[in-house]
Image (tube, grey):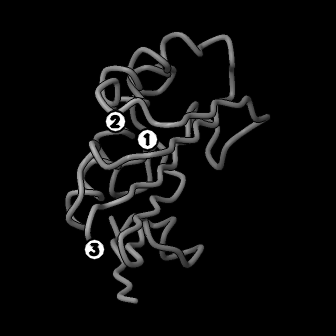
Amino acid sequence: MTRRHYSTETPWETFVGYSRAVKAGNQIFVSGTTASDIDGSAVCVQDAAGQTRFILMKIESALVALGASLNDVVRTRMFVVDINQWEKIGAVHREFLADVCPAATMVEVSRLTHPDHLVEIEVDALLDGD
């Protein structure tokens, strides 16, 4: 089985020792992704919808780099620090993924790795024929 790694080269990846995404055979696993820029600084502070949009664009870039697209997503997991924001977060999720309707989970967590992170999302994708 062929295995490829994709990195966005943010400080978190190097510090913790993980890849943004891994393609193994015909599956792609995108790590929990937050609204952090290349320097590791939080973006869209206090804006759960904005962070969700930033995250899904970052995830889309990782998928494209590994030969996939959002159309290949079969599962999303969303970790949020305020479940009361679920409608705003869910609306952006729908914006990006309504055409594929992946299996999805959204759970509230007490905190994420940076106090300005409101949302963290991970996805699994499945490619045909690989």
Q: Quadrant of the C terminus?
A: bottom left
Name which of mark 2 and mark 3 comes first in the sequence: 2
Residue sitting nearer the eye, 126 or 54: 126
How far from the left and from the top, in percent, is residue 77? 58, 41
Query: Which residue position is annotated with label 2?
Result: 54
Circle 3: residue type:
Asp
Q: Quadrant of the N terminus?
A: bottom left
Left or right of residue 33: residue 7: left
Residue sitting nearer the eye, 116 or 104: 104
User: Element under label 3?
Assistant: loop
Circle 1: residue type:
Ala
Query: Height in image: 105 above or below 31?
Result: above
Left or right of residue 107: residue 117: left
Density class for disc 1 (Cα within 10 Å; few <14, some 14-19, many ≥20) is many
Query: Height in image: 23 above or below 41?
Result: below
How far from the left and from the top, in percent, is residue 120? 55, 41
Name which of mark 2 and mark 1 comes first in the sequence: 1
Circle 2: residue type:
Phe
Residue sitting nearer the eye, 8 or 72: 72
User: Which mark is drawn over residue 35?
Assistant: 1
Query: Height in image: 36 above or below 126?
Result: above
Marks 2,1: beta carbons within 8 A: yes
| Alpha carbons under labels 2 and 3: distance apart | 29 Å
**Residue mark closest to the camera, 1 vs 3:** 3
How far from the left and from the top, in percent, is residue 76? 51, 41
Q: Residue at x 47, y 54 (%)?
A: 124
Query: Which residue position is annotated with label 3?
Result: 130
Left or right of residue 103: residue 115: right
